[in-house]
Amino acid sequence: MKNLIDVHNHTVASGHAYNSYGEMCEAAAAKGIQYYAITEHAPTMPGTCEAMYFTNFHVIDRNAYGLNLMNGAEVNIINTDGDLDLTPRILAMQDIIIVSLHSPTFNGNRDLESCTSAVINAMRNPYTHILGHPDDGQFPLDYDAVIRVAAEEGIIIEMNDASFSPWSYRKNCRENARIYLERCFHYNVPVILNSDAHFCSKTGCIDFAKEVIEENDFPESLILNDKPEQFMDMINKRRRSWGGEPIIF
């Protein structure tokens, strides 16, 4: 499988990543990535950029660095209602919205019911495209319920390479991935393997996620990394659901 897509990357603007926007894009282009997104942490993450940052992406050339370039946010799910930490007006300005649970930003209980409700409600937000790293055992999930809603809503499930690395702080990721991958197969829900890079040499890297895919015999037909047209069709279908314009390169 050729990796043509990486849409989860961070720059110095996120506060705990270490390269500039340009450096990240140059690294992606050098690795043969074609569809690329910078998705900074949204404002409740300590140290990241303010909401204003996410309102000025129109100044960026979509074809800079020889990439099909997108801009967006890794938005924090902040409570069990699935509320997000960017306003609808700003969410509508983004090309890509990844919704994720993070310890510093989630204000709900961390039991199965609360975390599952938070994720499902966030996925039902019309601006959501991708569920980020649903593998972290610090936030237990009813994977059958989560993946069923992903199928209903047209949400892409992320296989986060950083989750499966030896230095990951997330808990029981490989074991949890086995469960949600089986549910993705059952409900015919596609996944995207993303790097979650915070340093330029890591962008486009999905080797750990590929290991997990192979360990679980997950079919390549449900992996979007070498299917950019299908990936963009899913993104644009979600955008059209609230009246947004499709992304065209």
Image: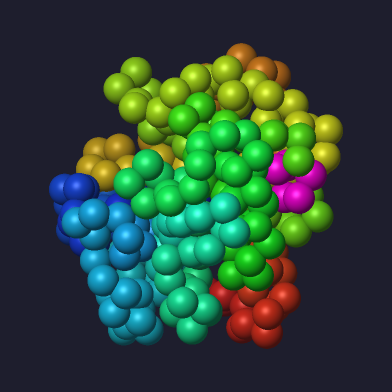
The spot of residue 148 in percent (x, y) is 79, 44
Q: Nearer the viewer, residue 70 or 106?
A: 106
Residue 142 sits in quarter: top right
Which corner quadrant of the image does residue 2 belong to? Answer: top right
Question: Does the magenta run of residues contain 173?
Answer: no
Furthest residue toward top:
215
Please name the predominant secondary structure of the magenta segment in the image: helix
The image quarter in which residue 124 lies: bottom right
For the N terminus, which image quadrant?
A: top right
Q: Residue at (49%, 48%) from the top-left corner?
A: 108
The residue sitting at 83% across, 33% down in the picture is 186
**Residue drawn at 65 percent across, 70 percent down:** 126
Q: Looking at the image, can residue 45 be seen? A: yes
26, 239: nearer the viewer? 239
- Which residue occupies the extreme front position in the image? 109
Q: Is 16 on the left or on the right of 104, as rendered?
A: left
Residue 93 makes an appearance in the image: no
Residue 135, horizontal then vertical, whole percent: 53, 32
In the displayed structure, 99 sits above or below 50; it is above
x and y, in percent, of residue 65 in the image? 31, 64
Question: Does the magenta run of residues contain 147?
Answer: yes
Magenta-drawn segment: 146-150
| Front residue of 107 and 77 | 107
Residue 71: % across, % down: 41, 68
Q: Is residue 17 rendered to the left or right of residue 78?
A: left
